[in-house]
Image (spheres, rainbow, N blue to C red):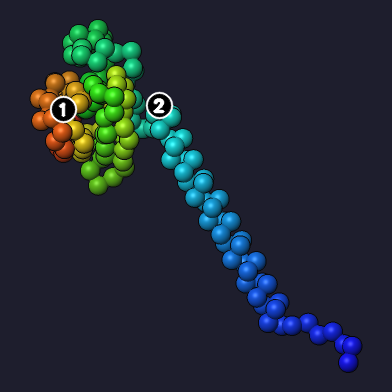
């Protein structure tokens, strides 16, 4: 009568709880790594296939006024933030997202891909240069969406 028997159901429950805890831990680790990876990619735009323009270039200067050597490439699109916060989205059509974040006042970004899709949350708070030419500003508060194709002679 003093015999102790192990409960097979208790062992199964313990195994299931342990498995669930391990799966939850794995999901947390994977999510944290993905978040850190996504945040880290914004901090190092030079490592991306599309170089970001130097912040030392004056925001209002046209490519002719920047003093670039004649042989230097003009970006397909260059976006310069003119407000405290400028939400910008640029991607290769049907492909990679190059930027999907808010730029801050004076910050700029440039891309040299042959074709790009651009979405601006407010087209009036940014300067956009298409193949070196200033694009007309959008209406205040209006979302702007457009495509840019690289000029052949650049």
| Residue 109 visible (yes or no) | no
Residue hosting label 2? 46
Vertical arrangement, residue 22 with respect to residue 107, above or below: below
| Residue 139 visible (yes or no) | yes
Residue that appears at 21% across and 36% down? 121
The image quarter in which residue 151 lies: top left
Vertical arrangement, residue 131 with respect to residue 7, above or below: above
Residue hosting label 1? 124
Viewed as shown, does residue 37 lie left or right of 20? Answer: left
Measured as percent of width and height from the top left, residue 153 is found at 15, 23
What is the residue that sits farthest to the front in this orientation? 1
Q: For the N terminus, which image quadrant?
A: bottom right
Residue that appears at 26% across and 30% down? 86
Which is nearer the eye, 57 or 138?
A: 138
Residue that appears at 29% across and 28% down? 85
In three-dimensional space, the C-alpha distance between marks 2 and 1, rounded to whole angstroms, equals: 27 Å
């Amino acid at each position: 009568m003093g015999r102790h028997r192990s409960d097979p159901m208790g062992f199964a429950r313990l195994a299931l709880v342990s498995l669930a805890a391990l799966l939850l831990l794995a999901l947390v680790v994977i999510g944290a790594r993905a978040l850190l990876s996504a945040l880290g990619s914004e901090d190092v735009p030079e490592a991306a296939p599309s170089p970001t323009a130097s912040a030392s270039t004056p925001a209002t200067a046209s490519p002719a006024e920047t003093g670039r050597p004649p042989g230097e490439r003009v970006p397909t699109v260059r976006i310069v933030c003119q407000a405290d916060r400028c939400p910008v989205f640029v991607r290769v059509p049907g492909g990679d997202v190059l930027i999907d974040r808010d730029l801050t006042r004076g910050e700029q970004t440039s891309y040299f891909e042959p074709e790009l899709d651009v979405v601006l949350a407010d087209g009036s708070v940014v300067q956009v240069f298409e193949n070196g030419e200033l694009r007309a500003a959008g209406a205040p508060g209006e979302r702007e969406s457009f495509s840019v194709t690289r000029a052949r002679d650049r």
